[in-house]
Image: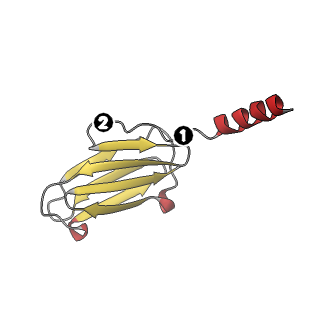
Amino acid sequence: KAAACRIKMTNIMTQFPKRQEPKVGPFVQWTEDAESVEMKLPIPPGLTKHDLKAVFTPVSLSITTRAEGKELLAVKPLAARIVSDETTWYLNKDIMTITLAR
């Protein structure tokens, strides 16, 4: 009975993957799990949230500066659809953290 319980728990746990190790690339950091993708994007020093325009659709994302319209990040199409209404972002110094909801 205990072995059957362990097998059942193992099957349940494989349905919910653990958060992967951070990935490094054009972002400072990138992590993902079954529900979300979190990216940390460096931005030019001195910009505030009012200086940035973030547009998220189910199949794309775009980050630009408002004043110059300088593109900081554009991805179209995304590797998988996102829930754009549940996607969030915030600034911490010169790092923009974007959480894409899956």
Disc 2 on helix, strand or loop? loop
Tally of marks: 2
Q: Residue at x 46, y 43 (%)?
A: 32
* Residue position marked by numbered label 2 in the rendering: 24
Q: Residue at x 24, y 63 (%)?
A: 52
Callout in the foreground (1, 2)? 1
Counting from the top left corner in percent of width and height, residue 24 is at 30, 36
Q: Residue at x 49, y 51 (%)?
A: 58
Counting from the top left corner in percent of width and height, residue 93 is at 20, 61
Q: Residue at x 45, y 52 (%)?
A: 100
Disc 1 on helix, strand or loop? loop
Q: Work out whether mark 1 precedes mark 2 in sequence or the reverse, and give the earlier one.
A: 1
Q: Which amino acid type corresponds to the residue marked 2 in the rendered image?
A: Val
Q: Is residue 3 left or right of residue 101?
A: right
Q: Which amino acid type corresponds to the residue marked 1 in the rendered image?
A: Lys
Q: Is residue 62 left or right of residue 36?
A: left
Q: Is residue 47 left or right of residue 2?
A: left
Counting from the top left corner in percent of width and height, residue 71 is at 22, 51
* Residue position marked by numbered label 1 in the rendering: 18
